Image: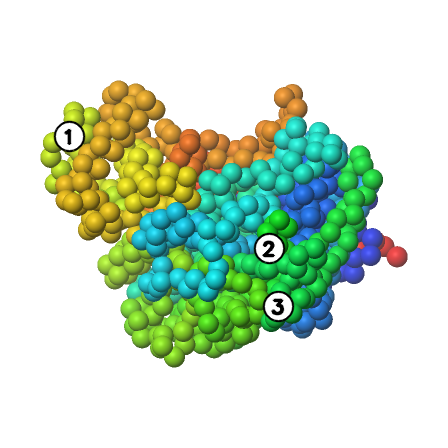
Amino acid sequence: MNDSSENLQMRTERVTIPGLRGEIDICVDRWGVPHIRAGNLDDLFFGQGFNAARDRLWQIDLARKRGLGLLAADFGPGFLAQDRAARLFLYRGDMKAEWAAYGPDAKEICTCFAQGINAYIDLIAREPARLPPEFAELGSKPDKWRPEDVVLIRTHTLLRNATSEVLRAQVLTAADLESDLLRQDLEPHIKPHVADGLDLGSIPLALLDVYSLATVPVFFSRERLAAKLEDAAAWSKFNPVGEVLFEEAAHASNNWTIAPGRTATGRPILANDPHRNHAAPSLRYLVHLTAPGFDAIGAGEALYPGIMTGHNGGAAFGLTLFFGHDQEDVYVYETRPGHPHEYRYQGAWEEMEIFEEAFAVKGAPDQKLTLRFTRHGPVVYDEPDVNRAYAIRTVISEAGTTPYGACLISMRTRSFEDFRKAMRKWGMPSVNQVYADKSGTIGWVSAGFNPARPNWDGLLPVPGDGHYEWNGFIDANHLPWVRDPASGYFATANEMNWPRDWPHLKNQIPAFEWHEGSRARRINQVLSAQAKHSIADSQSLQTDVLSTPAIRLKPLVAKLGGGDADARRAVALLRAWDGNVSAESGPAALFELWWSSHLKPALIAKFVADESARPLLAPGDPESMLPALEHPGPKFGADPTLARDRLLLDTLSAAYRDTISRLGPDAAQWAWGRIHHGSFPHAVTAVTNSGASHRYDVGPLPVGGSASTPMAAFYRTTDFRVMLGASVRIVIDVGDWDNSVWMNAPGQSGDPRSPHYADLAPLWAKGEYVPMLYSRVAVDEATETHIELRPQAK
């Protein structure tokens, strides 16, 4: 039964839910943020599940099917290979240990959350008009959830560093370590361990196909949906190497926490802007959860209960993905001739564990597919002709590593010591967590399961014969943390950030691959110069577009002489430029085209003679590329400085002409935002009917920034479309909670019929924010829709 009424201020809807125990109220504010209130925690998380389905049913249903390997049942044989890949990386361990890892009430929370989702699916059965249009577009329907579905799926988070190990083996074979550092710098600097007798050149790039297929988002095309059963294998690889490398390099985030003595408010300020792929709907979801004894507001993902960044009225917290943990290893096995399911381990032949699993396939009989596992993990590739197989060992096979699972504990802590204790249970992904509370305490904690490797560094594949084994995990108490730093603030941006006074020799952490430090250096530069930081200052810093690579390259450009007319014009423009990659800037457009499409590829070509290996180094790591340009070495030839300057001039000339081809001959009319666009693509756009009344994609929206600015805007160089950055931004005034602000683009709702599907995108593109309302009075005043969930009368 559904009753609704409207007035000028607020729309009220009452929904009767069979089996509901207590009353639940969902107050949706004018920006689409749901404030969910219940009389107890069970009803609260039921309400969160119901609301997640109300606003994001297509998204969470697709995510569940993708993660559990159930896509082919709805979409046909073209998705069968992806289903098999996903099931290789499902959690298959002890469920008792799994539930216990996230707190004593984790199973109950997930049970209530799943029941809430299922209640909305039942409501759709009674009221079909509620079904999101994507289901009709693709002829599918939502499935019911089990509690364990929330935790079994592991591949929706960021995994690392299996891809980098294989790429490093390829580059070291074709070139050398100095060249590979252009792809991924290593801090602390180390020479990667090469296992005795292992031929790096024999390790195929193709072993990453299944791994990539397990972790890549779902894409639809008419050809894929029309695939026949005999065509299923053709859809086992569809992400080009360039996309894999972009994904490997791009994910990042910013956060900082500032002590009361350094703020204009006299209270701590905590800011967080996690960077992930841009899509419609947004990956993140903003929500406010209120029940007796618990009142938390923040961002999470719609398919998980709780929040991962935000505050609970006592303490605020925010994360960046990732801290530098290396959580994966590629193992190479000798298989027994004539017996490909056996591999050599400690001098004997060991049988792989084999599962024959059924896969439902739309339009075809159920298929039985084989999944194989060694003692280290799933077998992702084999070469029977040379008696070899490959598996990936990853921490996600361990209990306690469902993405963000420990949030169910940490979101309820209200002291730094309790927060640190909760972080010891944090498994995946590896994170920097910043903290601030009403007492004025601020802090930072690094967290995540990090394998202990007694005799190697984890940077290259190793034999699976028993000589390279994990010795458990690094003791979480030995991971670095900081409380009330002397500087009065702590900031992270995925850079190498071990504290200087941390006892590295005693507590060695096998972490060598970090993001470049451009964003971190700029953030620290700004924060250190501000005596009294304000909420507005944090907003400005989250949307700051000063490029560290531009600032570092400008002195080299200023010294250049000669070159052709186009090179001289380019030099003149960049000399006068302030280094801000704003949407309105013409020199910014020239610089980004030069840096990404001309200078980086030319530098890689200078270092790597093998043309086939050069794409493996893209997009390139500024942390090593900039020093290579600032201090040219023998790779440049007999006169490194002269050769470096010639490289700069030649690429500047080419970049100037490239910019003309894209933006026209009048440099005064150039603007970075004319080609650099934020957009939020929807998975079904490619297969929708041309006459559909719903527009799924959002954008394009002119935006500034780059991969190296605090306002991260990672773009692909084919068309400069922004692929990844901060869709969510949060700035929290700790203690004066209603003074906090946030943003989630393109909008809160995942239903393209909703007014909140894309309403925040224009504000996001301008770097604007909306209120993060917390108090009951403020929420009630801003409520646009009131949804009353009520038990069925007995």
* Amino acid on which disc 1 is placed: Gly
Query: For this view, does 54 lie left or right of residue 572?
Result: right
Drawn side of residue 360 relative to residue 779, left or right: right
Mark 3 / mark 2, whichever is N-terminal: 3
Q: Position of residue 715 (x, y in %)?
A: 41, 39
- Which residue is drawn at the image coordinates 33% and 44% (left, top)? 608
Q: Secondary structure at mark 2?
A: strand
Using the image, tell me which numbered label, if any, was put on residue 94.
Answer: none
Give the answer, above or below, for where 624 lies relative to 619.
Answer: below
Q: What's the mark number on residue 345?
A: 3
Percent position of residue 32, x then y: 57, 44
* Quadrant of the image containing the N terminus: top right
The residue wearing badge 1 is 563
Q: Amino acid at mark 3?
A: Tyr
Closest to the observer, 185 or 440: 185
Q: Is residue 318 above or below residue 452?
A: above
Rounded to the nearest whole Å, what is the CA distance between mark 1 and mark 2?
A: 53 Å
Disc on the earlier residue, 1 or 3: 3
Within-10-Å neighbours for mark 2: few <14, some 14–19, many 20+? some
Residue at horizontal 46%, vertical 65%? 196
Residue sitting at 78 percent across and 47 percent down? 368
Element assignment for label 1? loop
> Where is mark 2, residue-wise?
388
**Tags 1 and 2 in contact by the CB under 8 Å rule?**
no
Looking at the rendered structure, the kind of residue marked 2 is Arg
Q: Secondary structure at mark 3?
A: strand
Label 1: how many residues lie within 10 Å, few (<14), some (14-19) or many (20+)? Answer: some
**Residue at the limit of the structure toward the front, as seen here:** 337
Q: CA distance from mark 3 to mark 2?
A: 13 Å
Q: Is residue 280 visible?
A: yes
Q: CA distance from mark 1 to mark 3?
A: 61 Å
Q: Nearer the viewer, residue 235 or 769?
A: 235
